[in-house]
Amino acid sequence: MSLSPESPVAVLCSGGDAPGMNAFLRAMVRLGLNRHETPVYGIRDGYRGLVRAARQVEGDPEGIVRLKQEIERNTGHRGLIDAQQCIIQMDHASVSGIMGKGGTILGSARCLDFHKPEVRREVITLLEKLGVKALVVSGGDGSLTGARLLAEESNLRIIGVPATIDNDLQFTEMALGVDTAVHTLVWAVDHFIDTARSHRRVMVLETMGRESGDLARMAALASGAEMVITPEGGPMTEASMIALAEKIEGAMTRGRGHAIILIAEGVRFEPPQSRNGAYILRDAFQKYFQREGAPFQDLEVRPSVLGHLQRGGHTTPGDCILAARFAEEAWKALLDPNGINGITALRYNKVEIVPFGCPDLPERAIHSRAMEHLHDDLSNW
Ligand code: ADP
């Protein structure tokens, strides 16, 4: 398939939002207009926007004509301020001033209907009728699975762009949003340290990261947090929690005044628990510190689940640069008549397109273990 300059390229953000999505959208629009003279359609609310637009025109022969007229009439900001308009032709001004802003001006969403092949068929038909020959999807694992299915079921050129703060996509060294989330966690740890020091406390902070502990690991390394607990370390048991508490107590005996523990949300417990890990650790630690004859019976343990604050905030220069590099590579793949459907990836510090379903980079697991080891050696005393 080759794109002619008049065929618009559609871009959407899907799943959990990640800082860098706006920077990516800006780069896609500006490169489209300035370098490739190709219009870019922004799709509102991820796959949900496409499904809504498909439903609007379904069974109405005039529907597609009206939709085209709406897109032509309400371009840029005019389209963006109308919450009902699902497809917006982006212009220079509509992406001005958004690069450093977290979230996404297009909106992101989850869309359960998109799991149904018949619904994806409706979306493919809609894009064909609009003359859209290519779709770019930025999002996490689920969104990229949806993109892979679209690629398999249509003749559209489909490019995925990893955007998820968890860094759980193992075919790329980094996804959009990770660098900013690490930055935010370092900021959070700095704030918790002040009170932990002043009150001689142990703070257990729960980070995002359901499948991967990468975010917690990087934040621990960059913030100097005393301990990091990740899903890759296997399930926590009562014995392993006591071992950690002993370690903290030992450090206190040697003169440490506080401890910050990062635990990734995906850490599992044996036997399984339904509460947040930060609270389970707090109870186990507190019980240990208050045992009879213990040296630091006043030591308080405070848990905090950091939650969605990790998703927002000003996008770091690292994420803005990665967004620009991903956009440049996405355009190359879109315009190359022999280009493949696939996902932009950072591998060995080079941006390239890898096919959907590309195997994990073996170095990722090795690197994670090495990082944890390095953190251990840096934080012990
Ligand atoms: P993320 O992309 O952040 O991992 P989700 O897993 O919630 O977030 O996926 C976002 C959206 O991607 C879903 O709401 C759905 O529209 C689409 N999606 C996810 N998994 C699939 C799938 N197996 N088949 C089709 N679409 C999917």
Image: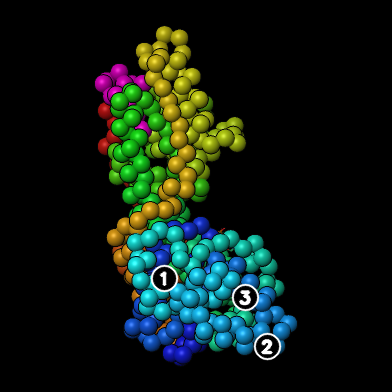
- SS class of the residue under badge 2? loop
Residue drawn at (49%, 67%) of the image: 106
**Of discs 3 and 2, which sits in the foreground?**
2
The residue tagged 1 is 25
Q: Residues within 10 Å of mark 1 (few under 14, many from 20)?
A: many
Tell which of 49 and 181 is nearer to you.
49
Place of residue 177 in the rendered image (x, y in percent of width and height, measured from the top left): 40, 57
- SS class of the residue under badge 3? helix
Whether label 2 touches label 1, CB < 8 Å: no
In the rendered structure, does residue 256 fall within the stretch colored magenta? Answer: yes
Place of residue 83 in the rendered image (x, y in percent of width and height, measured from the top left): 55, 68
Q: Amino acid at mark 1?
A: Leu
Residue drawn at (45%, 63%) of the image: 104
Q: Which residues are magenta?
A: 249-260
First of labels 1, 3 by sequence position: 1
Q: Is residue 261 above or below residue 253?
A: below
Q: Is residue 55 left or right of residue 198?
A: right
The residue tagged 2 is 62
Q: Is residue 332 visible?
A: no
The residue tagged 3 is 53
Q: Is residue 194 above or below residue 344?
A: above
